Image (tube, rainbow, N blue to C red):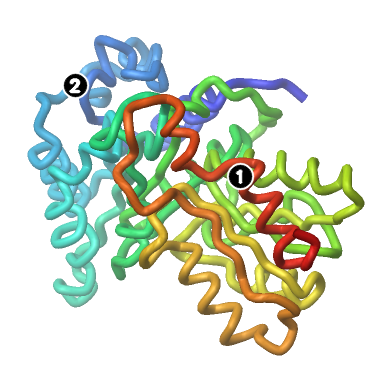
Amino acid sequence: MRQIQFREALREAMSEEMRRDPNIFLMGEEVAEYNGAYKVSQGMLDEFGPERVIDTPISELGFAGVGVGAAMNGTRPIIEFMTFNFSLVAIDQIINGAAKIYSMSGGQFNVPIVFRGPTGNAGQLAAQHSQNFENWFANTPGLKVVVPSNPYDAKGLLKTAIRDDDPVIFMESELMYGDKGEVPEEEYLLPLGVANVRQEGTDVTIVSFGKILKVAVAAAAELEKEGISAEVIDLRTVRPIDYETVVNSVKKTNRLVVVEEAWPLASISAEIAYHIQKHAFDYLDAPVHRITNMDVPLPYAGTLVQTVLPSVDKVVRAAKAVLYRD
């Protein structure tokens, strides 16, 4: 099977859907003439023209609002934020607009819109450009939140998100755009709310999503060298969350470590830990461990960045702790 980059998988998903449905368009900063800040939309202006691949001013509140209004009137916009750090400028349109209109209109208006772009740390970008807001958006009824970890999932989930009649937050990573993976040439879609068991194991369950899943997988490989069998689960979406897959895994391994790139308070890992203690408490042989960012704004210094973020070593130590091998 062919291998393509994460950015290429996203581009294929958008282009295939735009060929299928003339009501779909892409709008955001630098998506057209510059071929996308991270070259995700490269060549799309040439194929679809300036009425469907639209450069915007640096005004996230404005073009997010235009997208919401367009979605209410029968189109299916894809709104690209150059980074989800900038989505805070548009959060009123997302939270008080897109997420609530279906309910507030008594079902008269759907808002089939995708807000997509990179999230989280991408190197030495400092405190204002290195934040994770998956849990913020996942806290909002009316939104669906997707965080893929690889090119295959990115394409299949984005195509599904574009066809969804509800607003979807689709969160990527600058550090994943060049990642390569196997992606079929034939069409496929992946359902939202279904986790993927990346590898099966018997001793401890490790749950993660997005680019930090790579840390979880690398940690599982290190644990295997010491005879510890880790089951690794990729959530794929954090609203809805596939609780059943996680619960079933914990019933088998009796131990859980959750890894995410976000601050600890009210995070996705906290939600999963609560759900496991409610629905699988009798199966736990150790307290649930969480690995998150430290509870500080991300520093600029490279050495401090690595201290703050989740790491393979931190996950390995957490897994050993729940196994009482530390």
Measuring 73% from the left and 49% from the top, which residue is drawn there? Answer: 198
Q: Residue furthest front?
A: 326
Circle on res. 161: none
Looking at the image, how many numbered discs can be counted on the residues? 2
Q: Nearer the viewer, residue 292 or 150?
A: 292
Between discs 1 and 2, the one toward the N terminus: 2
Vertical arrangement, residue 154 with respect to residue 137, above or below: above
Q: Is residue 49 left or right of residue 325?
A: left
Q: Residue furthest right?
A: 227
Q: Which x, y percent locates residue 72? A: 18, 54
Quadrant where the C terminus lies?
Answer: bottom right
Q: Is residue 49 left or right of residue 270?
A: left
Vertical arrangement, residue 8 with respect to residue 230, above or below: above
Quadrant where the N terminus lies?
Answer: top right
Q: Which x, y percent locates residue 221? A: 80, 41
Q: Mark 1 to mark 2: distance in Å?
A: 32 Å
Q: Which x, y percent locates residue 181? A: 67, 28
Q: Secondary structure at mark 2?
A: strand
Label 1 neighbour load within 10 Å: few <14, some 14-19, many 20+? many
Q: Nearer the viewer, residue 307 or 291?
A: 307
Query: What residue is pinned by disc 2?
Result: 55
Q: Is residue 23 visible?
A: no
Label 2 neighbour load within 10 Å: few <14, some 14-19, many 20+? many
Measuring 59% from the left and 24% from the top, which residue is drawn there? Answer: 179
Q: Which x, y percent locates residue 234? A: 63, 52
Q: Is residue 147 visible?
A: yes
Query: What residue is pinned by disc 1?
Result: 213
Q: Nearer the viewer, residue 24 or 292?
A: 292
Q: Secondary structure at mark 1?
A: helix
Mark 1 belongs to which amino acid?
Answer: Leu
Mark 2 belongs to which amino acid?
Answer: Asp
